[in-house]
Amino acid sequence: MKELVEYIAQSLVDHPEQVRVTEEVSDDTIRFRLYVSPTDFGKVIGVKGQVIHSIRNLVQLGGYQAKKRVLIEVVEGGNELGIN
């Protein structure tokens, strides 16, 4: 699922080389953090959040099959990963 989130985000943004996805798995939850360039943040969120909502829906289907809750957090900048 991590690769799916990364692929979708990279296809939406102007700076696909700056897209990073981290994954944290616990007993009942999978949490993805999607790091994008500050200039691409709005493209991933979309008007009224429609784009990120659609991405979440797709990924939640995979989580449903794995019987895990799936969360996606979009992080602007990604300084923790060295993205400028």
Image (tube, helix red, strand yellow):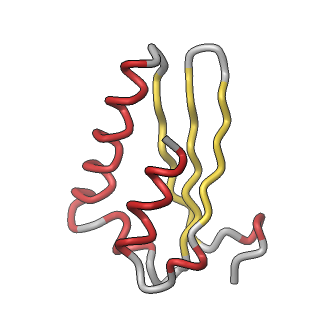
Question: Residue 64's spot in the image, x, y percent?
Answer: 37, 20
Quadrant in the picture for the C terminus:
bottom right
- Residue drawn at (48%, 19%), measured in percent from left and top? 68
- Left-right relation of 52 to 84: left
Residue at 76% x, 66% y is: 81
In the depicted view, which residue is nearer to us: 9 or 31?
A: 9
Residue 66 location (% of width, % of height): 46, 18
Total of numbered circles in the picture? 0
Residue 21 in the image: above or below residue 66: below
Q: Is residue 13 left or right of residue 23?
A: left
Task: Residue 32 in the image: state x and y as whole percent.
Answer: 56, 44
Q: Image point 60% across, 55% down: which residue?
A: 21
Image coordinates for residue 75, horizontal then vertical, percent: 57, 61
Q: Where, by quadrant of the figure, is residue 76 drawn?
A: bottom right
Compared to residue 38, the image places residue 26 above or below, namely above
Relative depth, front residue between 3 and 74: 3
Residue at the image position 42 percent from the left and 64 percent from the top: 9
